[in-house]
Image: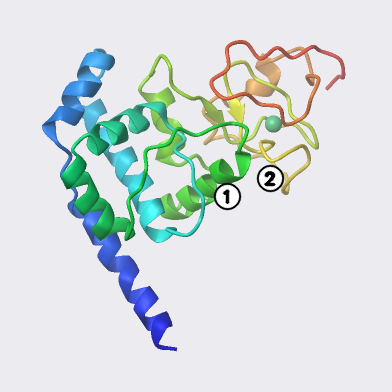
Amino acid sequence: MNWMTFRTDRTPRRLRAVSDLRFPAGGREHLRSRYPHLSEDDLVLVETATRQWFRLTARQSGAKLAMPSVVAGELWRELTLHTQDYAAFCDAAFGRLLPHEVASVTASAPLLATLSQGRRDEDCGPTGLPLLFRVDQELRVPDGNRYLADCGGRGECFPVANRVCLQHLGGPGKGPKPRGIRGDLPFNDGRHGYAGGAGGSGGGAEFGSDGGGGDGGGSN
Ligand SMILES: [Zn+2]
């Protein structure tokens, strides 16, 4: 079982490459010009989130993951422009070149895999939102993605405008419904804020959509 040993030894080395990564100054400049409202602390938070993304990828080089954050995706893209440095970093951290890709809502499985890996990475529990899923909202990124750990619906999704409900992303009724956990929800009374009841299609949350477009029907 030599290869097993080999595999397990590889991960710490890859994670070290991620923690040693120094973001180029151009990254912050790019973020500053695109999102002028971000403070220095905010920029550090974007780097932290981007590092989390790289950590997940370093651990899961085989699994398909998806970048959940717009602002971290921007910093990531900036990194890829430094072609040689980026290739060297990818080689050390992932053993392959990681192409820059933007998450798509039509592929919910990679996003959910990322969520589950992120929760493990951050140890934020089965209902928490890892930094990668929080950062756009926390930094009020105008074109960012807003996520909800759970809309509170049972068996079907209660759409909340401009929020992607992760509990029902994989389809209605997927996964056990945790009870009474609200403290870590970014929009913790979303269900009541959305007085209209359940929308038309369960699990049809849209990515950074404008206007939930729930067509009513159903009741609480
Ligand atoms: Zn939902």
> Cβ–Cβ below 8 Å for labels 1 and 2?
yes
Task: Measuring from the top left, give residue 69's x and y in whole percent.
Answer: 42, 31
Q: State the residue at coordinates (54%, 35%).
A: 183
- Between 68 and 147, the one lying in front of the other is 68
In this view, which residue lies farthest toward the right? 218
* Amino acid at circle 1: Pro
Residue 79 relative to residue 60: left or right: left
Task: Measuring from the top left, give residue 55's x and y in whole percent.
Answer: 35, 52
Residue position marked by numbered label 2 in the rendering = 178
Task: Measuring from the top left, give residue 83's x and y in whole percent.
Answer: 20, 41
Q: State the residue at coordinates (79%, 25%).
A: 201
Q: Is mark 2 within 8 Å of ligand 1?
A: no
Q: How is the image coloured?
A: rainbow
* Amino acid at circle 2: Pro
Q: Gap in Å between the C-alphas at discs 1 and 2?
A: 9 Å
SS state under label 2: loop
Report whether residue 34 is seen: yes
Q: State the residue at coordinates (54%, 50%).
A: 116
- Between 168 and 123, the one lying in front of the other is 168
Residue 57 relative to residue 200: left or right: left
Say if 45 sits above or below 141 in the image. below
SS state under label 1: loop
Residue position marked by numbered label 1 in the rendering = 126
Ligand 1, seen in the image, is in the quarter at top right
Q: Quadrant of residue 144?
A: top left
Q: State the residue at coordinates (37%, 38%).
A: 100
